[in-house]
């Protein structure tokens, strides 16, 4: 059997294979509420055979949304539809996960197909917050620097969101600390110029994430898997570095984080990213080898043999697919054929299953 299609047990769950639906914003919610689009989008990837379906960045507060179309979990009213989605995912033998997020200074932007520009308060947007009053783009309205009480409110929001995630039936939580969103803004000296206990030293800049992990773990028991997505580098001088990510990952491991989801970039608009197939696998590889924590690889992974090779070489434990699973919701079923392996098809689709290669 291929590693890609072999099971992996993490805490109290067993994933039926190593293929994960990476969180992908759909920008299709209203006031944070999920709808039929989310049910069909996430549900079809479960039907397609992915082991873990991680729901898009789901905001812990209204001002934490990237756009007005983001999903939210700041209200008890959000839970019933989310529970319907998780129930369907679990019926397919997949695991439902949720990515809890706060966008910080990268909030209040329009949806991509409308141009993705910042929405000002006068135009229906909201005032954004960040560790420091530094905008993402020079032409953007600057965020408001968070006060001590603001930070306490954010921590409380993550705890409340975790409790709602339990009620909604999620079996994995991922904390979004990548792509230039709030926690990443704290990590990087390019976006954090604070002089209090949340700025300056490496220990201070990671403090908020560590405190949130501790708070989440208070209610998300140690038997349940907890992931953290990080951007392993800013791809910019004097920014967050791969060495920083290794150090952070080692600390997160002591905090009972189970897996580091290894992405990169997103915090600085002038980043220079050398794109090539699997360009971020180097980070999952180094973090895994240096710390011993489980890692997930993501980024321009598009073929079953490519994914299998990453696992065979010990560079990651899970493969997270994003755009490829938008192109092909049934990638896992097709991967089994490509690798001459076996995977369970939905009973309703068995009649379309191709024969094994001779």
Image (tube, helix red, strand yellow):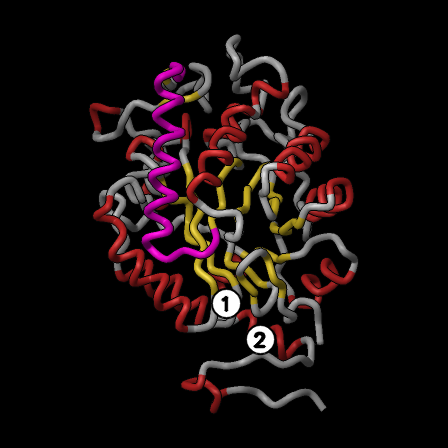
Residue 133 pos. (x, y %) = 42, 14
Question: Residue 257: x, y in percent?
Answer: 58, 43
Question: Does the residue at mark 1 contact the one at mark 2 (Cβ under 8 Å)?
Answer: yes
Q: Position of residue 283 (x, y in %)?
A: 70, 42
- Magenta-tinted stretch: 145-172
In front of the other: 89 or 142: 89
Instruction: Name which residue lies at 56% across and 71% down.
Output: 332
Give 94 or 139, whichever is nearer the viewer: 94
Question: Residue 102, located in which quarter of the rendered image?
Answer: top left
Q: Is residue 278 above or below residue 302?
A: above
Pinpoint residue 350: horizontal percent, then vertical percent: 48, 88
Q: How many marks?
A: 2
Determine if residue 12 is in view.
yes
Q: Is residue 160 shown in magenta? A: yes
Residue bearing mark 1: 328
x 52%, y 52%: residue: 223
Question: What kind of element bears circle 2?
Answer: helix
């Amino acid at each position: 059997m291929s590693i890609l299609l072999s099971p992996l047990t993490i805490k109290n769950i067993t994933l039926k294979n190593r293929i994960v639906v990476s969180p992908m914003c759909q920008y299709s919610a209203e006031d944070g509420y999920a709808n039929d689009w989310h049910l069909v989008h996430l549900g079809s990837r479960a039907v397609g055979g992915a082991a873990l379906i991680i729901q898009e960045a789901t905001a812990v507060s209204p001002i934490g949304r990237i756009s007005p179309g983001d999903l939210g979990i700041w209200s008890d009213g959000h839970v019933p539809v989310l529970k319907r989605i998780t129930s369907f995912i679990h019926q397919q033998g997949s695991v439902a996960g949720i990515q809890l997020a706060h966008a910080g200074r990268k909030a209040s932007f329009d949806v991509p197909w409308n141009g993705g520009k910042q929405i000002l308060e006068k135009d229906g947007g909201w005032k954004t917050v960040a560790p420091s009053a530094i905008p993402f783009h020079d032409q953007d309205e600057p965020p408001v620097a968070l006060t001590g009480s603001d930070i306490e409110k954010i921590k409380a929001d993550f705890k409340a969101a975790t409790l709602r995630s339990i009620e909604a039936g999620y079996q994995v939580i991922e904390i979004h600390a990548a792509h230039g969103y709030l926690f990443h803004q704290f990590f990087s000296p390019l976006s954090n110029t604070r002089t209090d206990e949340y700025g300056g030293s490496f220990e201070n800049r990671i403090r908020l994430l560590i405190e949130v992990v501790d708070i989440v773990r208070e209610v998300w028991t140690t038997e349940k898997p907890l992931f953290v997505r990080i951007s392993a580098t800013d791809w910019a001088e004097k920014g967050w570095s791969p060495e920083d990510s290794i150090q952070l990952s080692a600390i997160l491991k002591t905090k009972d984080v189970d897996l580091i989801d290894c992405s990169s970039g997103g915090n600085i608009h002038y980043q220079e990213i050398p794109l090539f197939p699997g360009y971020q696998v180097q980070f999952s590889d180094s973090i895994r080898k240096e710390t011993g924590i489980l890692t997930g690889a993501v980024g321009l992974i598009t073929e079953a043999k490519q994914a299998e090779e990453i696992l065979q070489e010990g560079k990651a434990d899970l493969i997270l697919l994003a755009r490829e699973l938008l192109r092909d919701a049934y990638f896992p079923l097709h991967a089994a054929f490509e690798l001459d392996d076996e995977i369970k098809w939905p009973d309703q689709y068995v009649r379309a299953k191709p024969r094994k290669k001779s």
